[in-house]
Image (cartoon, rainbow, N blue to C red):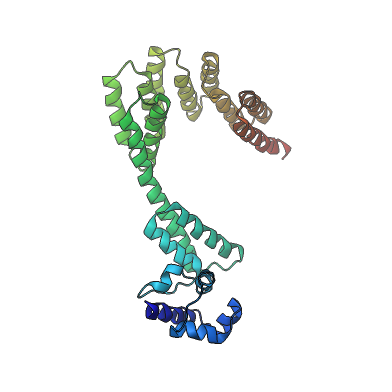
């Protein structure tokens, strides 16, 4: 093991183009000490190993491995670690190192590629984990947590849409609604499926069927307003949002929608007023973080007024 360790020390030093004297100077030891490490006569202490690893841009574990290759930099080495472990903490470490390279304006073309790769893997692993935990929620069923169950159904449908599975979403949800015509949540998901697919005319027709069957369900009117907005039917959209507010939404939903609609229409003062109303309402309920976010949204719109 000592031979492997000492051989790697020398290999990594030469790969970085450093002399024993330069290593010694950086580590505040003498060159004879570095020479003894590489000969296997003595070993660095446990506090020096991390410093050596960073200097050679490898990990401490690399010192003990056969056929280890020195990377261009420490960021690339950590990128490979993340590719192997899929551990989010390893991603964060690699991300921090790449950001140092960006800040110092020393990012190479290879670094850019490696940085993109770790985000690609993060996206891939994230997708797998998302589906895994969504399925765990759905396996427990609606009785375990009604709110989590329906939110999970909605988010899973949205993710599938982003993966190009719109037709599957729509066909599957149509069958579910046919078998469960009295479940308003299934109708709401059908509207979502059409909207995610960008099929707003069909969504509008399904909305009219749904709201005729469930005239006092606020969430349907939020969907109806969003659909009408996409179709350029702004007056109708506002009517639906107002109706949702009259019935009583869950989390100022209709106010957010109205604020966004006013902003899209260039009615910035009304948009700001709506965001501030949201902030006041949420703060009264104890949602300070969400209230701060609404105030930030209001400030963004205010800047449009000033231009």
Q: How many marks?
A: 0
| Vertical position of residue 5 compared to residue 233: above or below | below
Q: Decide if residue 221 is on the left or right side of residue 135.
A: right
Looking at this view, is 131 or 65 the one in front? 65
**Residue 240: percent from the left, percent from the top?**
51, 19
**Residue 275: percent from the left, percent from the top?**
63, 29
Looking at this view, is 151 or 273 the one in front? 151
The residue drawn where x is 46% and y is 24% is: 223
- Whether residue 55 appears in this view of the structure is yes
Q: Decide if residue 251 is on the left or right side of residue 118.
A: right
| Vertical position of residue 6 compared to residue 132: above or below | below
Quarter-of-image position of residue 301? top right
Quarter-of-image position of residue 5? bottom left
| Vertical position of residue 128 compared to residue 8: above or below | above
Q: Decide if residue 25 is on the left or right side of residue 88.
A: right
**Residue 185: percent from the left, percent from the top?**
38, 22
The residue drawn where x is 64% and y is 23% is: 284
- Whether residue 202 appears in this view of the structure is no
The residue drawn where x is 38% and y is 78% is: 4
Q: Decide if residue 90 is on the left or right side of residue 31.
A: left
The quadrant of the picture occupied by the N terminus is bottom left
| Vertical position of residue 151 compared to residue 238: above or below | below
The quadrant of the picture occupied by the C terminus is top right
Looking at this view, is 6 or 267 the one in front? 6
**Residue 131: percent from the left, percent from the top?**
35, 41
């Amino acid at each position: 093991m000592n031979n492997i360790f000492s051989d790697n020390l020398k290999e990594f030093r030469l790969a970085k183009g450093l002399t024993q004297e330069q290593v010694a100077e950086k580590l505040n030891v003498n060159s004879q000490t570095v020479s003894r490490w590489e000969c296997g006569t003595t070993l660095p202490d446990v506090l020096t190993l991390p410093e050596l690893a960073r200097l050679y841009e490898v990990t401490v574990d690399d010192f003990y491995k056969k056929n280890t290759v020195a990377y261009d930099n420490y960021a690339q080495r950590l990128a490979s670690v993340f590719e192997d472990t899929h551990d989010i903490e390893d991603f964060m470490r690699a991300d921090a190192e790449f950001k140092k390279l960006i800040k110092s304006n020393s990012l190479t073309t290879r670094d850019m590629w490696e940085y993109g790769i770790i985000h690609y893997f993060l996206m891939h692993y994230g997708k797998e984990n998302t589906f895994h935990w969504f399925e765990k929620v759905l396996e427990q069923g609606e009785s375990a947590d009604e709110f989590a169950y329906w939110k999970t159904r909605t988010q899973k449908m949205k993710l599938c849409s982003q993966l190009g599975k719109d037709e599957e979403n729509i066909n599957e949800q149509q069958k579910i609604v046919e078998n469960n015509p009295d479940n308003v949540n299934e109708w709401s998901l059908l509207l979502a499926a059409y909207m995610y697919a960008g099929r707003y005319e069909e969504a509008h027709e399904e909305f009219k069927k749904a709201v005729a069957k469930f005239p006092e369900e606020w969430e349907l009117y939020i969907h109806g307003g969003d659909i009408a907005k996409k179709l350029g039917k702004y007056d109708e959209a506002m009517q639906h949002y107002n109706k949702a507010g009259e019935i009583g939404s869950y989390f100022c939903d209709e106010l957010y929608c109205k604020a966004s609609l006013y902003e899209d229409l260039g009615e910035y003062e009304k948009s700001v007023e709506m965001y501030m109303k949201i902030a006041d309402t949420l703060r009264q309920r104890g949602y300070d973080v969400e209230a701060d976010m609404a105030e930030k949204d209001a400030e963004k719109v205010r800047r449009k007024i000033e231009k």
